[in-house]
Amino acid sequence: MPLDDILARIRTAESAANRAAGSVTLIAVSKLQPLDRVMAVLKAGHRVFGENYVQEAQGKWPAFRERFGPLSVHMIGPLQTNKAKLAMDLFDAIHTVDRPSLAEKLARLAQDRGRAPEMFVQVNTGAEPQKAGILPGDADAFIARCRDLDLPIAGLMCIPPEGEDSTPHFRALAEMTARNGLSGLSMGMSGDFEAAIAAGATHVRVGSAIFGARAYG
Ligand SMILES: *Cc1c(COP(=O)(O)O)cnc(C)c1O
C-alpha cells in the first residue's frame, strides 16, 4: 500500500541526511478522507494521524481510539479560540499555535488541567497575507511570550508558499528552531517531505500521497 512506499521513502531520506532511522514521525493526514481509507491505514498498523477540523476529528477519532487502542492525533489546521478547549481533549499535539490570543487561551487551559498536548508554533515563512502563522520577524518574541505563559512549545511548523521551492523555507524554519533552543520541526507534505527531512524535519505531514485525492466540498 502507499503507506509502505512513503515509510520506505522516509527511511531513505533519513539515511541520505545521516539521520537515525525513525527520527522522523510520519503524520498521516486523514482530513476529508473516506473512513475506509483511514481504516486501511490503521489496520496496516499506523498510529499517528493529522486532522484539520475539530468537528471532523471529533466525529472520527474517539471511535477509532476505542477500536484500535492508543493513537496519536495531531491538529494541523487553523484553530478557533472557542474550540481550544475541545481541541485540548481531542488532540495529542497542536501544530497551529499562531497568535497571542490562542496561546493565552491554551496556556490557561493547560494550567487548569496540569497537562497539555505537544505544541508547535506555526510560522508564516513566506509572509503570505492569506496564510495563518506568526511572521518570521515576530517569531522569537512570540516564542518567548509562550514561555512566559508556561505554554510548553515543542517546536515550529510551516507551510511554504505553493509553487515555490520549499527548501529555503525549511532551512529558515530549522534555523529559527535552533536559535530558540527548540527541537521539533513540523514541515514537509506529500510533494516535498524528502526535502523537509534533508533540512531537519522531525514531523512530516503527508496526506494525499498516502490516501489519494481528498473529497472537497
Ligand atoms: C492538508 C495538509 C497537509 C497534507 O497535504 P498533502 O499535500 O495531501 O500531503 C499537510 N499539512 C497541512 C497543514 C495540511 O493542511
Image (tube, rainbow, N blue to C red):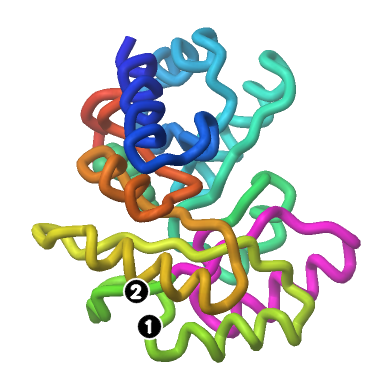
Q: Position of residue 177 (x, y in %)?
A: 50, 70
* Residue drawn at x 47%, y 52% as measured from the top left: 76
Q: Amino acid at mark 2?
A: Asn
| Front position in the image: 110 or 176 | 176
Residue 135 belongs to magenta span: no
**Residue 136 drawn above or below residue 24:** below
The residue that label 1 is drawn on is: 136
Image mark for residue 104: none
* Residue drawn at x 14%, y 59% as measured from the top left: 165
Q: Do residues under tags 1 and 2 come within 8 Å of each other at their CB atoms?
A: yes
Q: Which residues are magenta?
A: 95-122
Q: Residues within 10 Å of mark 2 (few under 14, many from 20)?
A: many
The residue that label 2 is drawn on is: 124
Residue 32 picture quarter: top left
* Residue drawn at x 36%, y 42% as measured from the top left: 17
Q: Nearer the viewer, mark 1 or mark 2?
A: 1
Picture quarter with ligand 1: top left
**Residue 94 drawn above or below residue 46:** below
Residue 142 picture quarter: bottom right
SS type, badge 2:
loop
**Residue 35 drawn above or below residue 142:** above
Q: Outermost residue, left direction?
A: 163
- Earlier sequence position, callout 1 versus callout 2: 2
Q: Amino acid at mark 1?
A: Pro
Q: Position of residue 3 (x, y in %)?
A: 37, 18
Q: Quadrant of the N terminus?
A: top left
